[in-house]
Image (cartoon, coloured by chain):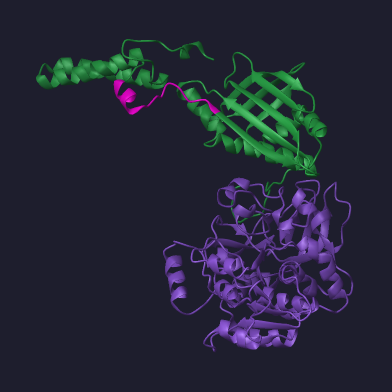
Amino acid sequence: MRALCWNGINDLSVETVPDPGIVNPHDAILRVTMSTTCGSDLHFIDGYIPSMRAGDVIGHEFMGEVVEVGSEVEKVGQGDRVVVPSFICCGHCWYCQHDLYSLCDNTNPKPELQEPLLGYPTAGIYGYTHAFGGYAGAHAEYVRVPYADTDCFPVPDEVRDEQALFLSDAGPTGYMGADFCGIQPGDTVAVWGCGGVGLMAQQSARLMGADRVIAIDRIPERLRLAREQAGAETIDYSAVDSVVETLKDMTGGRGPDACIDAVGMEAHGTGPAYVYDRAKQALHLHTDRGEALREAIMACRKGGTLAILGVYGLMDKFPIGVVMNKGLTVRTAQQHGQKYLPRLLEHAAQGELDPSYLMTHKFSLEDAPRGYEMFKNKEDGCVRAVFTP
Amino acid sequence: MRDGAAVMTHANGRINVGDVERVASAVAGAALFKRGLKRRSLGGLVLAAAGGSLLYRGFSGHCGLYQRLGRDTAHNDPTAVTRAITIGKPADELYRMWCDPQILSRIMGHFAEVRSIGDKRLHWSAHGPLDRSFEWDAEIVDDHPDESLAWRSLAGADLPNEGRVQFTPAPQERGTEVTLFMRFDPPGGALGKAAAQVLGSAPGLLASHVLRRFKSLAETGEIATTRHNPSGRVSAV
């Protein structure tokens, strides 16, 4: 089959690789209908996250049709149209049973790659480094889905493919972020980042009853989407002196009740802290640029909630003293997609949440490298590049 | 334990040079000694003296330099490791699983195969580098059903070892805490080095792996794998 492979830093190519097959009794094989780029892919494409190997098939956000199931699969069958969360989860361990799916104990076959850094292994991911299991990704014609009963979610007829696609990752991640905020009536939620996850977080915050949503970014097309799709007020951080002061002014001097970081380790910024971050990154002395996160910490009202969705490695210069003295609640995790998908599909079926506008650009799988280039450089207003095999 | 590894007391100390190294030392020493005597010069005497000490080192198995450096290539240190994991199943179910040699084989993964050879006895076959295998028989030496199980390799084992697994209820509904203790006594010399390689650079890793695989099998009925994983590489994984 044809598949998009990582062959080195910023080196992607579409190659012919073996088809996947049923290996374990709870597996299913999907024919991929569509798959999409995600901001977190850039972290390993750029080489900031280690343990990729030349030849790895990438792609972790996808939906498709079941073509084959293992002997123990009961809930899905051949021909089912399904969406699958990026994290591979067994459904039986303590973590899965407590809705902490991305912390699954049983789906990383290479725990020794994570334990030195994290102390414990977490769930495996499709197409996202060997530290996260080394599973082949979904920018391909077919993909093997372990634990199909837990991880395949049938898509209702009313929900189109391009709506279901983004419920594999961007949707549940953003929704979880809004859920973390514990939104109360009258709350203002500020979201850093108007990429796929940020926009989903903004829409979700609205759905959960936030009084105001304020979105922060610098790309005009993305700020426009925030206004149009999420009804958000927007701040262009490159056009104001201080995002923190602007947010204070907008909220009667209180600061937002909750702040969501949907930017992550490759934050763009200005000023001495950013220069410091970039210098250390170039010297491989630390992995993260923490501009957005630091700003969110400073801006959040006292006693407020900080939801961290951005992916990070190791950061120094983290203002923990500010967090402590302001009494902030920090909630963070990789997406627990299996927890949120049922209600997300319900929202989509009711017409309350439609993420299909995220598909700004569509490519054949054969042109996927060009798609990633466009996505990475944010050319032509690209928010997400979607591939069809 | 091989009898050859018996410690010999000597005027200068014990054996601290491995077998293969001793032979090499003796051969080199003899050659140097001969060459040195042939030269019939001061330089030749020095060579002969060097050859002589290498010869002595080969025959006695003791090296003064090694002793000063704290090096010992004759004995590989025993490795003992303890690891624990919590599994969401009751102790009696896990105990029954652990008693099944087929399940033991599965959770040992690449390390070893296990089969029953009679009442409370198992035969183990561990895979080493260069296709050599390490074989041993083991017997259950202590058995408290649903609580713990201890085993020990029998005489003649290629890789002497002992182990113990304990099943303790975990708090609330978390299931059972499973604690695994393993101790390996690799034989001396090159054989021991190969055995040490079988165990891997971190025997704790082996214990962790075994427990994780046991947990996956118990909780989900299968073990996560990336066998036959599609990639742009020629190799299978």
Q: Identify the chain drawn in purple.
A: A
Q: Nearer the viewer, residue B120 or A182?
A: A182
- Residue occupying the point 46% across, 66% down: A281
Quadrant in which the N terminus of chain A appears: bottom right
Magenta part of the protein: which range?
Answer: B64-79
Q: Colour of chain B?
A: green
For residue A139, side relative to residue A51 (left or right): right
Please tell me how many numbered marks the rendered image carries: 0
Q: Nearer the viewer, residue A255 or B237?
A: A255
Q: Is residue B75 magenta?
A: yes
For residue A100, side relative to residue A70 (left or right): left
Please provide percent x and percent y for residue B150: 69, 23
Please provide percent x and percent y for residue B195: 53, 27
Question: With respect to residue A11, does A298 lie above or below?
Answer: below
Q: Is residue A76 magenta?
A: no
Residue A309 in view here: no
Quadrant in which the C terminus of chain A appears: bottom right
- Residue occupying the point 58% across, 32% down: B81
Question: With respect to residue A282, does A89 lie above or below?
Answer: above
Question: With respect to residue A304, does B202 lie above or below?
Answer: above
Q: Nearer the viewer, residue A167 or A118?
A: A118
Residue A215, image quadrant: bottom right
Please provide percent x and percent y for residue A10: 53, 67
- Residue occupying the point 84% across, 65% down: A342
For residue A147, side relative to residue A222 (left or right): right
Residue B77 in view here: yes
- Residue occupying the point 51% across, 28% down: B194
